[in-house]
Image: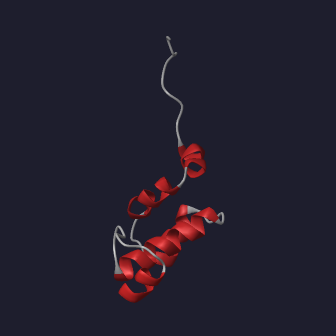
Amino acid sequence: MALALKRAGISDPPSSGASLLRHSAATSMLRSGATLEAVGTVLRHRSLDMTAHYAKVGIAMLEQIAQPWPGELTC
């Protein structure tokens, strides 16, 4: 894995080994339109909460799950 990261020009990855592979796979799946449930199934997570942190991979994904701010805006 270290050699592959070096060849790709990635000098400071956020994680390495299996964690990096799993995160990359989950990110790719979500960006391709997979649901969090589908990603959780592939990664064999026991709960959706474990998979939910992958939702932060893109603004478009966050916009789909974001809830409106309660009350009225006063600006």
Give the answer, above or below, for where 58 lies relative to 66: below
Give the answer, above or below, for where 6 lies relative to 27: below
Q: Foreground residue, 7 or 54? A: 7
Taking the spot 40% from the left edge, 88% from the top edge, the residue there is 3
- Residue 45 occupies which quadrant of the picture? bottom left
Q: Position of residue 7 (x, y in %)?
A: 46, 83
Instruction: Name the colour scheme.
Output: secondary structure
Is residue 12 rendered to the left or right of residue 52?
left
Taking the spot 35% from the left edge, 67% from the top edge, the residue there is 14
Looking at the rendered image, the quarter that the N terminus falls into is bottom left
Q: In this rendering, does residue 1 appear at all? A: no
Q: Foreground residue, 30 or 49? A: 30
Q: Position of residue 74 (x, y in %)?
A: 49, 11
Q: Foreground residue, 71 or 56? A: 56
Residue furthest out toward the right: 33
Taking the spot 54% from the left edge, 53% from the top edge, the residue there is 58
Is residue 50 rendered to the left or right of residue 56?
left
Taking the spot 35% from the left edge, 82% from the top edge, the residue there is 17
